[in-house]
């Protein structure tokens, strides 16, 4: 398989199904941001963290490819007139969302209750989690904008929403594991 095809040299790219769109199309921005998120999660996975978190992150990376596939598919080409799927792309299931929820609950059990917002930082690995969380929120914003124009499976949006929550709790868990200080955000009083 050749890496360069020259078909995008004029600023367009093909979606699953063959439709060509400009590279600045919201659909491209959406799945491109999911790809960026996946790379940030790979960076977290490459840190010295517990094995269970690494295994969950690998599952998340796999599911982000499914999210990207949903976002990269031309909905008009995905379904036949009979209503059957034409393209065999992976999707997000309720079990995928429940995995994130279960992991959030499991990690929260060992953490002190949150009484304030926390400032991102404290350790490089924790900062990587916060960056990934912010990229995930951006991916979610773009995906919801795309959804308004061209609806797709709602579970995709739910997954991105839950994933940003997971990444926040993972940042707190890693702060705890790494004995990094969690600095509470306490608004300064006006004088």
Image (cartoon, rainbow, N blue to C red):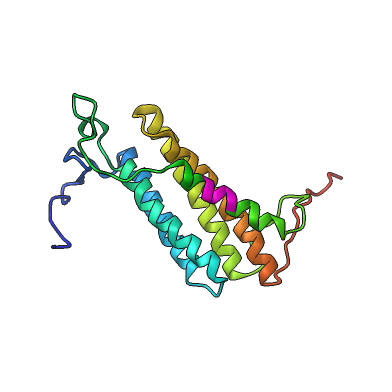
Between 30 and 152, the one lying in front of the other is 152
Q: Is residue 17 above or below residue 80?
A: below
Q: Quadrant of the C terminus?
A: top right
Q: Quadrant of the N terminus?
A: bottom left
Left or right: 166, with 74 as reference point: right
Between 52 and 78, the one lying in front of the other is 52
Q: Report the residue that reaches farthest toward the bottom.
A: 48
Q: What secondary structure characterizes most of the magenta part?
A: helix
Q: Report the residue that reaches farthest toward the right.
A: 191
Residue 41 x/y as whole percent: 47, 61
Stretch of the chain drawn in magenta: 98-102
Whether residue 93 appears in magenta in the rendering, the answer is no
Left or right: 64, with 166 as reference point: left
Q: Residue at x 67, y 66 (%)?
A: 175
Q: Is residue 159 above or below residue 81?
A: below
Q: Residue at x 58, y 70 (%)?
A: 124
Residue 72 x/y as whole percent: 29, 43
Residue 115 x/y as whole percent: 78, 49
Residue 88 x/y as whole percent: 24, 43
Q: Residue at x 78, y 48 (%)?
A: 187
Left or right: 169, with 156 as reference point: right
Q: Residue at x 73, y 67 (%)?
A: 181
């Amino acid at each position: 398989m050749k890496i360069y095809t020259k078909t995008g040299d004029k600023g367009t790219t093909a979606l699953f199904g063959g439709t060509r769109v400009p590279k600045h199309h919201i659909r491209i921005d959406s799945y491109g941001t999911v790809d960026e998120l996946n790379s940030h999660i790979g960076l977290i996975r490459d840190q010295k963290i517990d094995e269970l978190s690494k295994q969950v992150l690998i599952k998340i990376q796999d599911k982000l490819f499914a999210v990207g596939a949903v976002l990269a598919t031309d909905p008009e080409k995905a379904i036949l007139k009979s209503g059957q799927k034409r393209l065999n792309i992976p999707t997000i299931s309720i079990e995928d969302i429940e995995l994130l929820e279960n992991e959030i609950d499991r990690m929260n059990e060992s953490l002190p209750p949150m009484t304030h917002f926390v400032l991102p930082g404290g350790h490089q690995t924790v900062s990587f989690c916060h960056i990934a969380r912010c990229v995930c929120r951006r991916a979610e914003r773009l995906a919801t904008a795309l959804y308004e124009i061209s609806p797709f499976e709602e579970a995709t949006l739910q997954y991105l929403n839950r994933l940003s929550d997971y990444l926040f709790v993972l940042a707190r868990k890693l702060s705890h594991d790494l004995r990094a200080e969690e600095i509470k955000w306490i608004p300064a009083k006006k004088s």
